[in-house]
Image (cartoon, coloured by chain):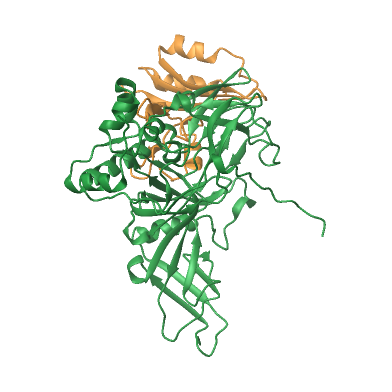
Amino acid sequence: MSPKKIILRFGKDISDKPIIYNLVKNYDLVINIIKANVNPKKEGTLVLELTGEKYNEGIEYLKSQGVRVQPLAEEVFRSEDKCTNCGVCTDICPTGALYMKRPSMEVMFNSDNCIVCQICLQICPYKAMEVRF
Amino acid sequence: MVIERTYAEINEKIKSGKVVVMTAEEVISLVEEKGVSEAARQVDVVTTGTFAPMCSSGVFLNFGHPKPRIKMQKTWLNGVSAYTGLAAVDAYLGATELPEDDPCNSKYPGKFSYGGGHVIQDLVARNPVLLEAVAHGTDCYPRRELETMITLDDINEATLFNPRNAYQNYNCAVNLSNKTVYTYLGMLKPNLGNAHYCSAGQLSPLLNDPYFLTVGIGTRIFLGGGIGYVAWHGNQHFPGIQKDQAGKEYGPAGGTLAVIGDLKQMKPNWLVGTSILGYGATLTVGIGIPIPVINEEVMRCVSVTDKELYAPIVDYGEAYGQRVSGNLGYVSYAELKTGRIRINGKEVPAAPLSSYSKAREIASISKEWLRKGQFFLAEPVKLLPSYKDGIEAKSLEIKNI
């Protein structure tokens, strides 16, 4: 069973509840937290990689708790031709999916860590980053 | 024994295939191991490189005369305006020029997805480019408008002439304000969220000739994947030595080069159209200067390492835009390259805008050209002004008129 990436959004009414604890405990799912954030309005965003037999039941549980679930269907790619290995994306990428290999100073892209926020598409001076559906 | 070499002696060795060339990166370990004198004895030429956005770039074009003839008054290439306040079918296309209808920063931050730099890259890539021109019409130049497609091979000349390239050193930009800013050094997050720098450091051409002992008018260089020349010192050429308030020296400040070359022999992967979010369009230029080891002093200069080269840290949240002088201290390129620096006690992620791996590639290509006898050194007609000339920057006073 391959892991699935999902984005979970929590309203402020539920962001303090132990929902993820229950998800892991009751549905026996393996989780890998890629990104977690609570904004000043106390709304939460969580990007997860989820694996397990009871995946679908787990998703139903999340929805029943008021969590909005969105699959990460889009994928970001890097054009090796256009990328100049400058590195200006590496301190902007929020998850470190784009990072600098040292000491060669080449830009690496680990798509497993990408949360498709697409900020790299905006800031790349050479339009080397692309999103596909 | 004092080591001295002439340009003619080095060129003889290039011709016979016996020239010894190292990159500015490779020579560091040789000098560490054998010392400056022995390294100077062994190596004839040290190659350098840099690959970064260089806004003061552009190309002089001569389109050839249409039938009937025209004296172009306004000209556009793929919708990007080129200056035609020259003779009939001459134009200068600047790297940062934008299409007339570009939304710019009206939807902030603007994308600036196409501009003069992109047109230059399209020309070099041999892509067809739309040429439009209007004129008032004269007895000798009766045509009043034209619209046609051109390629680089269709036109008479295309001379890349960049009035200011290859900055010797540059600021490390940070943002002390509490909002994100979009600068020519990229997106800077608030409250010292990140730091951007733009230099190849120990590989950078002018950091390897800090006192202008070899680079001068007529120096032959790697320019945009082809061969070019140093035409003059660049504008805003301030080759002084930077010092902190206590008088401690932090190496070269900011000499620059004006460079020239035939665009037709350049390559689109070394002249790249560039879009900087919220700032504008520009051109990323690849430049490399092979430095002749004419004496030990030159070898000492080219063996400089990132640990000995420093960038001033400047606040682009407010101080830069408001031209408030001073900086937040100096940081070495060795520290910057680790990706984390400390400013005011805070650890700040750092990233480059200048591609170090491309700089290394330029130094390697130049080395191959020299070894294969495809590139000879040119002795400068005149060396460029150095720190000894005491050049001071002028600012523009806004007078009451």
**Residue shown at 30% from the left, 44% from the top:** B366
Q: Looking at the rendering, which quadrant does residue A132 occupy?
A: top left
**Residue shown at 47% from the left, 26% from the top:** B308
Quarter of the image that includes the N terminus of chain B: top left
Question: Among the chains, which one is orange?
Answer: A
Task: Give chain B's shade.
Answer: green
x then y, percent, for residue A18: 56, 12
| B100 lies left or right of B375 | right
Q: Is residue A80 visible to the viewer in this orientation of the structure?
A: no
| A27 lies left or right of B362 | right
For the view shown, which residue lies furthest in the bottom direction?
B139
**Residue shown at 42% from the left, 36% from the top:** B208
x then y, percent, for residue B8: 28, 48
Q: Looking at the rendering, which quadrant does residue B303 occupy?
A: top left
Quarter of the image that includes the C terminus of chain B: bottom right
Foreground residue, B352 or B378?
Answer: B378
For the view shown, which residue lies furthest in the left direction?
B16
Foreground residue, A130 or A73?
Answer: A130
Q: Is residue B41 above or below residue B86?
A: above
Q: Is residue B157 above or below residue B224?
A: below
x then y, percent, for residue A70: 48, 31
